[in-house]
Amino acid sequence: MKRRDFLTTALAVPFLGWIPRKQPVFGWLPGFPSTDKPFNQVANHLERFGSGKVACLWKPFEAIVGHPWEAHRQQGPDCVAHASGGGIDILTAVQIIMKQSKEQWIAKSNTDMIYAGGRKIIGKNKLGRSGGMPGSWAVKYLKQYGNLLRQKYDDFNLKPYSESTMGKWDRQGVPTALLEIAKEHPLLEYAPVNSWYEFRDAVAAGYPVLWCASFFGGYSRRDSDGFIKTSNKKKWYHAWLGAGIDDGKRPGACLLNSHGSNYGSGPKRHGQPDGSVWIDAKYIDQHCRNFNDSYALSLYKGFPKPEEDYILW
């Protein structure tokens, strides 16, 4: 990595406490492509499903929780955990509203556990002191070991987003008692998206996308269409949550970032949340194809809603 790119990345990504000594990148780590069957093979019935459509998956989420999407603000190199955890949250809302599943909304996903579990259990300490992880580790962890929410579980208070907890679990592992609870709530299905068309069709069908890329998105001023200027010359290894698509005159995707609500300024499109930007489809396509480490999240075993409310005495 050139010195100017290192400085640009370091300024763009708030990594607190994790300073990689050997890895040239921070939050998302490339070089671990998926070996799973891609979306167009496992969901070939959805080919061209998103053609010409607009889909805004943050709207079902906002309808369920009763307030606008609150942008995540990462405290370490855990953008992959924030993007995948946020994807689980949006998928939960989509399943409740669009799929009419008998689930209930309780709280957001605990990203500390996804980060530590993906690195420690799936990654098996391969990265040493370096921070971050590939997207593949997050989805594999969520499928094999499950998900927990930001709430209390017995003696564990998982409500706050905690840099210290994330670091502790990254070193020592997620407590066994929490893993036992989490296994009841796995990500049941996911599939790699290896092109804009797969990305588009997945989001149009209600499946948020964990999108991993290396383009520079530091120019966060949105143009009149809500899109930001991007560059492939400068590198920003980062994971985003693909939560919207517009396949109209200017095809592209709405990406939710984990740098707080102030990331992105200027005009908005389709009522997009604070902290989000639109990216042209050609960049989505390019980075899906180049890295093969982006995933549509399609089925999650959430928290069942009681059939009725009972009074017991």
Image (spheres, rainbow, N blue to C red):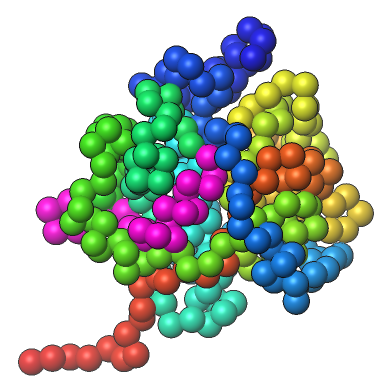
Q: Is residue 93 above or below residue 14?
A: below
Query: Camera-side residue: 168 or 271?
Result: 168
Asked whether, in this view, residue 77 is left or right of residue 226, the answer is: left
State the residue lying farthest toward the right. 249
**Side of 40 where 118 appears, left or right:** left
Q: Is residue 255 visible?
A: no
Position in image of residue 214 (x %, y %): 67, 31
User: Would you say 169 lies left or right of 69 here?
Assistant: left
Q: Position of residue 270 (x, y in %)?
A: 73, 56
> Magenta segment: does it hold 311?
no
Dividing the picture into quadrants, the one containing residue 191 is bottom right
Instruction: Please tell me which residue is depicted at 47% across the width and 48% down the height of the picture.
Output: 138
Task: Give the quarter of the figure containing the C terminus.
Answer: bottom left
Numbered label tally: 0
Q: Position of residue 265 (x, y in %)?
A: 67, 34
Picture quadrant of residue 276: top right
Locate residue 110 relative to residue 235 in the image: left or right.
left
Q: Residue at x 84, y 52 (%)?
A: 251
Kindly identify the residue that appears in the image at 67 percent across and 46 percent down: 292
Q: Quadrant of the N terminus?
A: top right
Coordinates of residue 52 in the picture (x, y in percent): 86, 65
Q: Is residue 284 above or below residue 237?
A: below
Q: Tell me the magenta residue range.
A: 134-157
Residue for point 61% across, 52% down: 35
- Tell me where residue 263 sits by quadrant: top right
Q: Residue furthest top?
A: 3
Q: Is residue 111 above or below residue 217?
A: below
Q: Is residue 140 magenta?
A: yes
Residue 25 is at least partly visible in this image:
yes
